[in-house]
Image (cartoon, rainbow, N blue to C red):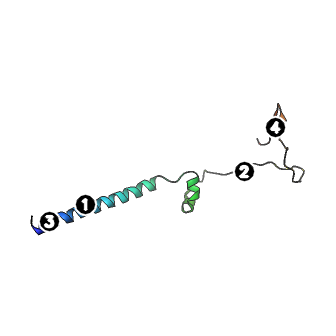
Amino acid sequence: MSKLSNNRTRCTAVLFKLNALIFLIIAAMVVTAQTPPYGVSAMLRLDSLPYLSSIISAGQQSSYDRSGGNDDSKHFLYAGGGENVMLD
C-alpha cells in the first residue's frame, strides 16, 4: 500500500469513530431529556425543581391540644370499638 492510501484509511477510521462517539453522546442526551427525574430523586435535584409537576402537592396532618395547652396526646376525634381515630 502506498503512504497516501494508508493515511486515508487511518483518517476514515478516525472519522468513523468520531461520528460514532458523537452519535452516542447525542443519543444519551435525548434519552436523558425524555426521562424526567421522579420521586425523591426529582426533589433532590435542585436544578429541576422548577420543572416539577404542579399537580403534585404536599400536606400535613397532626394532633393538637384543643384547650390551647401543650398536651396533644390522647386527643382523638372519636373512639369506639377498641379503636381510637386521631386523623380522618
**Foreground disc of the pair 1, 2:** 1
For the C terminus, which image quadrant?
A: top right
N-terminal of the pair, mark 4 or mark 1, is: 1
Q: Distance between the residues labelled 4 and 2?
A: 19 Å
- The disc at residue 84 is 4
Depth check, front residue: 9 or 24: 9
Question: In the structure shown, which secondary structural element does the residue marked by tag 4 occupy?
Answer: strand
Residue at image position (56%, 55%) is 42
N-terminal of the pair, mark 3 or mark 4, is: 3
N-terminal of the pair, mark 2 or mark 3, is: 3
Image quadrant assignment for residue 32: bottom left
Q: Distance between the residues labelled 3 and 4?
A: 86 Å
Image quadrant assignment for residue 12: bottom left
Total of numbered circles in the picture? 4
- The disc at residue 16 is 1
Q: In this view, does 31 lie to the left or right of 17?
A: right
Residue at image position (37%, 56%) is 27
Residue ID for mark 2: 60
Percent across and percent down for residue 63 are 80, 48
- Callout 2, which amino acid? Gln
Q: In this view, does 62 lie to the left or right of 4?
A: right
**Foreground disc of the pair 2, 3:** 3
Q: Distance between the residues labelled 2 and 3?
A: 72 Å
